């Protein structure tokens, strides 16, 4: 009798728990992910819409006679295009890309396109991975994306080295969307680890921009490389929030909503502390920029606001149950909203009538703030006991010998670092 009386009570508790979970999940919006982050400035966000247009240009067969250019064009001068590689050129080892010499912005840009649903080679890159399969520089990375990045560096090393040495004041930027974002992010890491291959290029000249980023590196690497890698997320984009391995996502592509809902329920039951302790769990790389343009319980799009931070915990850990989760992944929408956000930032600066001298001072202050935020993120990763995370030296440098002791093998595991260097050198954060 007592057992029978207890059954309704258990059912009531279970129903209340499910109702509470559904209520919290439905109320969780993308704005909650970045509500404590700072507001991005026009100076730091300026490259994003421009790089999105360069990525879109990779889809064109002939840039002199474009078919799909966005309003205002791609912003590319065909005479400055160094090379354009197609699937036939890469033999399926990497997604197509272009190398563009941007004299207007003193930038050497290597831009990758996103996933092509009709190409088996793209799926092969995604499927070439298992949880914890590939170690790199003291953490874990996506094996297939790392191989693609290494292949690109092998193929374009000489021309990149020539351009870097010919234009010593130009930055070197790697960017990509979706699948290409993972290749661009890991290529940035590989170049930073092998700067001698590009004429000992200064770390500060190397940049990576992952648009709609894939989760391609462990948390300690995502934070450690936040000074050179930036990720841009539009509102509810599903990919940066889905901890499900990329290979599993695209195996279930035709039932993606079902997969996202199941994953959403599963992740809700896993404490974040446990997630942070898993060294193999992959994350969106680097500093994050979140474009927020919709508000809960309101229709339509609002003027976009860009938030930025280098978070350690709360790093897009919850899937947003939204009908825009897949459309916000499209590079066309990201370029459009990023351009709108930049335009609003510039208009605000014009209204404030900031003198050029103060703009320069603001840029210097911004650089200092980013450095401080970066160091604070490294320290917080240590505080939260993130596996293989370590705090920076008070002098802002660390010795490569110490780094090798901490590392699983940027030297031993990476194909580019099989031979350890005999001399110890200093790497600046």
Image (spheres, rainbow, N blue to C red):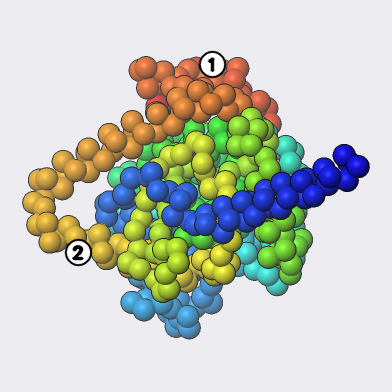
Up the image or down, 267 lies above or below 117; here it is above
- Quadrant of the rendering where the C terminus is positioned: top left
Among numbered discs 1 and 2, the one appearing first in the sequence: 2
The circle drawn on residue 402 is 1
Residue at screen point 26% across, 40% down: 366
Residue at screen point 22% across, 38% down: 365
Q: Secondary structure at mark 1?
A: helix
Q: Let me know if residue 319 appears in the view.
A: no
Quote the CA–CA distance across marks 1 and 2: 47 Å
Up the image or down, 395 lies above or below 310; here it is above
Q: Secondary structure at mark 2?
A: helix
On screen, residue 64 versus residue 11, left or right, reads: left
On screen, residue 425 versus residue 360, left or right, reads: right
Q: Between residue 117 and residue 308, name the one nearer to us.
A: 308
The circle drawn on residue 347 is 2
Q: Between residue 382 and residue 155, name the one nearer to us.
A: 382
The circle drawn on residue 233 is none
């Amino acid at each position: 009798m007592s057992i029978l009386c207890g059954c309704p009570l258990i059912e009531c508790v279970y129903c209340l728990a499910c109702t509470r979970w559904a209520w919290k999940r439905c109320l969780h919006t993308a704005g909650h992910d970045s509500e404590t982050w700072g507001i991005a400035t026009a100076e730091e966000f300026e490259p994003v819409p421009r790089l999105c247009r360069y990525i879109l240009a990779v889809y064109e067969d002939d840039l002199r006679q474009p078919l799909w250019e966005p309003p205002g064009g791609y912003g590319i001068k065909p005479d400055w295009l160094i090379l354009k590689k197609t699937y036939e050129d890469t033999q399926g080892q990497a997604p197509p890309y272009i190398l563009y010499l941007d004299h207007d912005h003193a930038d050497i840009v290597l831009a990758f396109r996103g996933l092509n649903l009709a190409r088996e080679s793209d799926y092969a890159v995604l499927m070439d991975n298992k949880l914890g399969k590939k170690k790199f520089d003291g953490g874990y990375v996506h094996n297939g994306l790392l191989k693609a990045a290494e292949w690109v560096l092998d193929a374009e090393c000489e021309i990149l080295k020539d351009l870097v040495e010919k234009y010593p004041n130009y930055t070197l930027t790697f960017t990509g969307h979706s699948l290409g974002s993972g290749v661009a992010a890991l290529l940035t890491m590989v170049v930073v680890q092998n700067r001698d291959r590009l004429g000992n290029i200064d770390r500060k000249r190397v940049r990576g921009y992952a648009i709609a980023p894939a989760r391609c590196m462990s948390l300690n690497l995502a934070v450690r490389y936040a000074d050179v890698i930036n990720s841009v997320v539009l509102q509810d984009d599903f990919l940066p929030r889905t901890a499900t391995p990329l290979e599993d996502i695209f195996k279930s592509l035709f039932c993606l909503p079902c997969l996202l809902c199941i994953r959403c329920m599963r992740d809700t039951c896993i404490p974040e502390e446990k997630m942070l302790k898993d060294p193999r769990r992959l994350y969106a790389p680097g500093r994050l920029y979140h474009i927020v343009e919709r508000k809960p319980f309101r229709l339509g799009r609002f003027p976009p606001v860009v938030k930025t931070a280098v978070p350690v915990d709360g790093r897009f850990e919850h899937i947003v149950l939204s009908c825009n989760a897949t459309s916000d992944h499209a590079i066309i929408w990201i370029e459009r909203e990023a351009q709108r956000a930049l335009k609003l930032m510039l208009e605000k600066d014009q209204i404030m009538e900031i003198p050029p001298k103060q703009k320069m001072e603001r840029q210097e202050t911004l650089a200092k703030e980013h450095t401080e935020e970066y160091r604070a993120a490294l320290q917080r990763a240590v505080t939260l006991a993130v596996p293989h995370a370590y705090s920076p030296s008070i002098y802002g440098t660390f010795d490569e010998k110490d780094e090798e002791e901490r590392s699983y093998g940027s030297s031993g595991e990476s194909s580019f670092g099989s031979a350890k260097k005999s001399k110890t050198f200093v790497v600046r954060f």
